[in-house]
Image: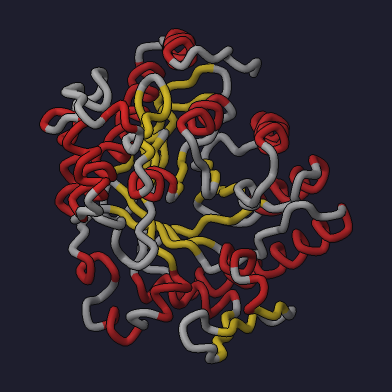
Amino acid sequence: MTFKVLNKHEFARRGELITKSSTVQTPVFMPVGTYGTVKGLTPQQLHDIGFEIILGNAFHLHLRPGLETIKKFDGLHDFMCWNKSILTDSGGFQIWSLNELRKITEKGVEFKSPLDGSKIFMSPEDSIQTQLTLNADIIMAFDECTDYPSSQDEAENSMNLTHRWAKRSIDYFQKHKDGHLLFGIVQGGMYKDLRTESLEFMSNLDFDGIALGGLSVGEPKKEKTKILKHLAPELPENKPHYVMGVGTPEELVEGVRYGIDMFDCVMPTRNARNGFLYTSKGILKIRNSEHKNSTKPIDENCDSYTNRNFSRAYLHHLDKCNEILASTLMSIHNLAYFHKLMSDIRKSLEENKFEEFLDSFYDMRSLKKPQL
């Protein structure tokens, strides 16, 4: 791996991350393909938008189609026909999201399958081996995603378990890696002292990157910002910084301001399927009756395939008729918007005009720029 910081403005960084499959320009937004597909889009459509990296989910792919199937294709890239980078989640998020279907022990986690109720055990070593079998470019250490709200004792116990699992993850990874990259995950809930302790622990291990977990589990935005602001000056300069499961355009912009290089979220495609479209001025709700006869594009400042070719009236019509094409076209638009947002951020950092970008971004939304 090579990671280089090419330019900076305060904490914000313009960088480049080279994996075994592709070169990823950062800051970057990564679409989520839980089951080996970004819902509603072909790999070619993702390529045409310009994405260099997407996500898969180790836990769900372990369940379906199963590792024996994916082994026949030498990994997820060939299985899903994607020739650029893939990052896989370790299953740590499912410890949180499937909390009624799991039992945590020091050894690992016993899940009850959400498909048929059968028992599935996953240890840190199992998680790393699963991700290696998927042949992901970037894999994540196994962690416990700390719940919100949690008491300080609960957050500390969760963090300490994550640390012990991180050590086991990296020990197993070092014996089996083959061009893959491993990121450690910082936990600690909403407690600054625990977050500092966790970041120091992860930074002292030989991880290729640092992720911030437990920042998309229902906490208020101000709590998330508090943690990002606290950690920004402490993040290691020579490693990529990834905040998991975030988020809205505003959260991406603020994340970059606090030194984050990588983001992922299901929001662009999930919201597209529900008729919520991202624009330079905010959210457009295509299901509203005002769009029934509108000849306007979604956003005059966007050059997505959807925006160039289809009117609001046509998308409104497709959505009302429950046509599959509605989800596809609106997902293309939303992902193209997120891709362009990150591209504009990178350009502003290259040209030393990041403050001008921030002013324009918030002015277009009639929002006040938050203090750094």
**Tag count:** 0
Looking at this view, name the residue that lies furthest to the bottom: 118
Q: Tell me if residue 170 can be seen.
A: no
Residue at (53% x, 32% y) in the render: 251
Q: Residue at x 38, y 16 (%)?
A: 348
The residue sitting at 41% across, 10% down in the picture is 353
Left or right of residue 259, residue 178 in this image: left
- The answer to whether any part of residue 303 appears in the image is yes
Residue in the picture at 39% in, 74% down: 61
Colour scheme of the rendered structure: secondary structure
Residue 273 appears at what percent x and percent y?
Answer: 34, 49
Q: Nearer the viewer, residue 276 or 170?
A: 276
Quadrant of res 350: top left
* 2 displayed left or right of 332: right
**Residue 10, quarter of picture:** top right
Q: Is residue 197 above or below residue 126?
A: above
Q: Residue 281 at x, y = what percent?
A: 39, 19
Q: Is residue 269 above or below residue 174?
A: above
8 vs 85, left or right, is right
Give the image location of residue 212, x and y in percent: 61, 47
The picture places residue 269, in percent across and down from the top left corner, at: 35, 48
Q: Is residue 271 above or below residue 358?
A: below
Q: Quadrant of the C terminus?
A: top right
**171 or 78: nearer the eye?**
78
